[in-house]
Amino acid sequence: IIKGNNLLTLTTLLPVYRGKIKLIYLDPPFNTNSSANTFSYNNSFNHSTWLSFMRNRLIAAKQLLSEDGILVTAIDHYELFYLGVLADEIFARDNRMGVISVIHNPGGRQDETFFPTAHENMLFYAKNILNVKLNRLPATKEKLAEYKLTDKFGRYKLRGFRRSGNNSLRSQRPGLFYPIYYDPLSDQFALDSVNKHMVKLLPIDKDGVERCWRWSSERFILNIEKYIEIKKTKDEYTIYIKERESDYEGEKAKTICHKPYYSGQTGTNELKNDFQEKVFSYPKSPYLIKDIIHICTNDGDIILDCFGGSGTTAKAVTQLNQENNGNRKFILCEQMNYIDKVTIKRIEKNLSSNHTFCYAELTKLNGKYIDEINKSNSTKDLIRIWQSIKKGGFLSIKVDPKEFDKNVSNFEKLNLEDQKKFLIKVLDKNHLYVNYSEINDKDYGIIDEDKRLNKQFYSLK
């Protein structure tokens, strides 16, 4: 877990993790007019600013992805089309895997003017779509309950051997129209009549329409014992395939995800269960994120979430590891101060005893002054911070400190919020954090333990 500006965190990870991340999940500020403090920072950017914000992060994310890696971005309809065009430009349109709609509020937001929003969108992009192979979703309890019949090979359910619906006519698949002979006395099947007791069966429905079987004659003969069952109803016989639970590979994820445990309310309830109170607005359901991780990654893969929020992605990874004794790994980036009381605490509550995590912060330079400015409660404090900035901070090239000091009385006339904005504006935003190249500069006071950690980290590349 890394605390700090997520764009700088992504670039910090590049020397070590370039081309190594299997899944990157982004849940950015949606740029809506909503008052929801989803991320506890600006959720209503200027449109062009928001696009620049996203573009920089998508470019860095693409470099971190492995050649079979996938990027998933959550977004609502306000910026969906713009984000899609932007991602098409960066990843290439041919690498767009799909747009998934997730029903997160079945009742819809009733305060909306036109259509109450009931879903969010998930954009899936591949680094190289030719290299991607998705896993299937695990069987649900409801699906497993369908296998009610049992024989010596295990649990199964029945499906008619004669095709129906699309592409089921004899004229469409003539090779699958052939006679099957059944001897009720010996309970034997054959492709030719060998005695007078044999009943001839053809794939013709009750309306006399010539259809076709599901399998070729060769496959039918080879799989009779394990997969074929016949039943007599009145004066006719019907052949069935035994669809076995042991053969079920899971369900393909669909473009509309409508499962109760994907809802936003589930996400809220899960977080409340971890803290016994509301500590974060609109967290994602860990079951939704867990299924995304399941279909996109395999054991040992690395998952990166650079809008770490309440730690839902980390919880989903740990749950998946516990369920299959796996070893997927997560990297979370978060810049807000709730990381200590929410994100980290939640991970600690859900991490199994045989797993650990490492926490680090980008070492602040001008960033520490911004923190002090935001916490300040008086003009006197801000003047004191200004004196510290002159000694140890980096000022914007547009700022002349002598002019500031000469006109400090004008600064003092501003209200406190405007004073804070002004003081933050004089800082050079290119020096929010200490660069690794400056690690031995005594002015920054980097302790030996942190120096060792950084050298170990960058030696991994």
Image: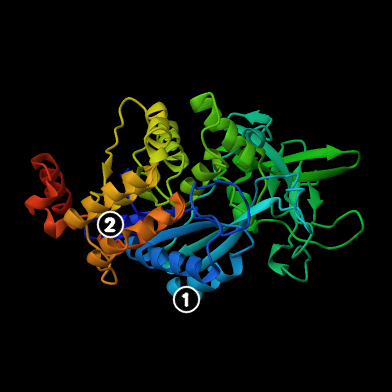
Label disc, if present, on residue 432 of the rendered structure: 2
Residue 449, relative to residue 67: is it above or below?
above
Q: Where is residue 256 in the image (x, y as percent from the top left)?
A: 66, 54
Q: Position of residue 144 (x, y in %)?
A: 63, 34
- Secondary structure, mark 2, is loop
Check disc 1 and give the amino acid type: Glu
Question: What residue is rendered at 35% in x and 54% in y?
Answer: 5
- Tell me which numbered mark, 2 or 1, is placed earlier along the sequence: 1
Q: Please say whether residue 367 is visible from this viewpoint.
A: yes
Left/right of residue 216 with respect to residue 271 in the rendered view: right
- Position of the C terminus, as image quadrant, is bottom left
Q: Where is residue 158 in the image (x, y as percent from the top left)?
A: 71, 40
Q: Please say whether residue 225 is visible from this viewpoint.
A: no
Classed neighbour count for the residue bearing mark 1: other residues with Cα under 10 Å, few (<14), some (14–19), many (≥20): few
Left/right of residue 383 with respect to residue 211 in the rendered view: left
Q: Where is residue 30 in the image (x, y as percent from the top left)?
A: 56, 57
Q: Name the residue under label 1.
A: 89
Check disc 2 and give the amino acid type: Leu
Left/right of residue 38 with respect to residue 126 in the rendered view: right
Label disc, if present, on residue 29 of the rendered structure: none
Q: Quadrant of residue 267?
A: top right
